């Protein structure tokens, strides 16, 4: 028996008929011989993990700028949390765990330094030149900007992982469209799982970071129905826990509540809609992976709370405004004097255009690198 048959037999034995099997992939832009021991999606996952863009996520922040403290979430820790949640959901639904993991690990590769503030200002600056969207940028990273292989540009990922990146959609991210990635079709269930895992991770780690930073207190959260529901289930012996353990226990319980509801609701939806295969998944005009109406309603006040108490907190607004000024001023310097760009970036101007090359350069920066670059450009006492 050939080794490649083992992968197919495994997927047929353990994955549901509506899971995306790797042997049914639409393939890669540049055809490659398949690996005897790893599926196509396992190889995609490994290529993503070993990419420079993935490593840089360690120093790209979510809400707090890097130097605010090393205990806050970064894009890397967020991506790992999304991956963990997505794997758990995919396993319960008998989906392709490797595909879900690959999409989860790649979904933020195109994010800028300084969180959403960086994305907003780059989109504003690039509006005359095609704008900026982190889904499109993530795809650009894996298709073009990563330079690791002699036979093709980028990472040459499978069609399904690339589709998952471009169609990534959540309360915080808007799906994009590419004609070569079937914009008229719903994405795979694995992509839909990652979308919701992203929301779950966002909300709950922002609760953690918000409490840790002192932007709000636990007593502020006790008014939220979902918070009260979880706390009411704790035995009396838990009431004397110290704040750190209590916080961790509540947030863990919140994640468990949402993941459990999502799995149960999705299983019921799959049965009700008689979903038999991937073709059935793609013909629907609405996501199949979703929360029950009850839990969806419980989540809304939590997200409103985070928007008011965290994202619009004066400290966060100050950090965001500073970050936007840094990026705007760097962009203007590079745009007016492109010879100040590193030689490698200057070489891309002919193929991509000056502004897109500058945008790629800034978007690829970590928080720390952007701050250092800003000092080199504007501080007369900083070595260049």
Image (cartoon, rainbow, N blue to C red):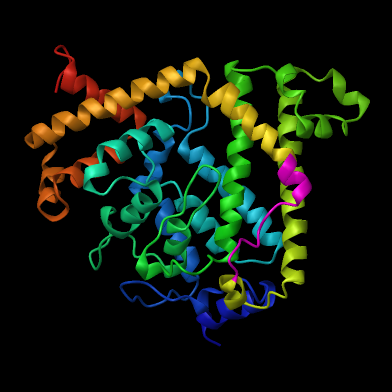
* Magenta region, residue range: 284-297
Residue at image position (60%, 66%) is 96
- Residue 288 drawn in magenta: yes
Q: Position of residue 186 (x, y in %)?
A: 54, 66
Magenta residues, dominant SS class: loop
Q: Position of residue 168 (x, y in %)?
A: 49, 54
Q: Is residue 29 visible?
A: yes
Q: Is residue 67 visible?
A: no
Residue at image position (71%, 33%) is 251
Q: Is residue 31 left or right of residue 106?
A: left
Q: Position of residue 299 (x, y in %)?
A: 70, 39
Q: Position of residue 97 (x, y in %)?
A: 60, 62
Residue at image position (56%, 88%) is 1
Residue at image position (29%, 46%) is 131
Instruction: State the image quarter where residue 7 is shown.
Output: bottom right
Q: Residue furthest right?
A: 236
Count of marks, rendered view: 0
- Residue 311 drawn in magenta: no
Q: Quadrant of the C terminus?
A: top left
């Amino acid at each position: 028996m050939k080794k490649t048959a083992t992968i197919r037999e495994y997927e047929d034995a353990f994955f549901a008929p509506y899971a995306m099997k790797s042997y049914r992939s639409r393939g890669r832009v540049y055809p490659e011989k398949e690996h005897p021991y790893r599926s196509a999606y396992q190889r995609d996952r490994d290529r993503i993990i070993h990419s420079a863009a993935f490593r840089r996520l360690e120093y790209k922040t979510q809400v707090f700028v890097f130097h605010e403290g090393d205990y806050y979430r970064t894009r890397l820790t967020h991506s790992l949390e999304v991956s963990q949640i997505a794997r758990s959901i995919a396993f319960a639904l008998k989906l392709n765990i490797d595909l879900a993991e690959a999409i989860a690990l790649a979904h933020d590769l195109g994010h800028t330094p300084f969180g959403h503030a960086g994305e907003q200002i780059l989109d504003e600056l690039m509006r005359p030149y095609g704008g900026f969207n982190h889904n499109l940028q993530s795809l650009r990273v894996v298709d073009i900007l990563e330079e690791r292989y002699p036979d093709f540009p980028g990472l040459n990922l499978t069609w399904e992982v690339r589709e998952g990146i471009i169609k990534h959609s959540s309360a915080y991210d808007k799906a994009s469209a590419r004609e070569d990635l079937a914009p008229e079709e719903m994405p795979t269930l694995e992509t839909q799982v990652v979308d919701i895992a992203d929301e779950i991770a966002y909300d709950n780690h922002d609760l953690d970071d918000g409490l840790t930073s002192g932007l709000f207190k636990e007593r502020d959260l006790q008014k939220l129905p979902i918070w009260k529901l979880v706390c009411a289930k704790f035995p009396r012996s838990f009431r004397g826990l110290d704040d750190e353990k209590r916080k961790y226990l509540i947030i863990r319980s919140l994640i468990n509540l949402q993941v459990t509801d999502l799995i149960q609701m999705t299983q019921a939806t799959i049965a009700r809609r008689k979903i038999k295969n991937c073709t059935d998944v793609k013909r629907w005009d609405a996501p199949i992976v979703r929360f029950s109406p009850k839990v969806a309603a419980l989540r809304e006040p939590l997200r409103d709370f985070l928007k008011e108490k965290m994202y619009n907190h004066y400290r966060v607004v100050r950090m965001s405004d500073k970050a936007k000024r840094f990026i705007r001023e760097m962009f203007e310097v590079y745009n007016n004097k492109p010879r100040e760009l590193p030689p490698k970036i200057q070489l891309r101007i002919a193929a991509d255009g000056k502004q897109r090359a500058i945008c790629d350069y800034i978007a690829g920066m970590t928080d720390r690198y952007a701050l250092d670059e800003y000092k080199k450009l504007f501080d007369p006492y900083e070595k260049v």
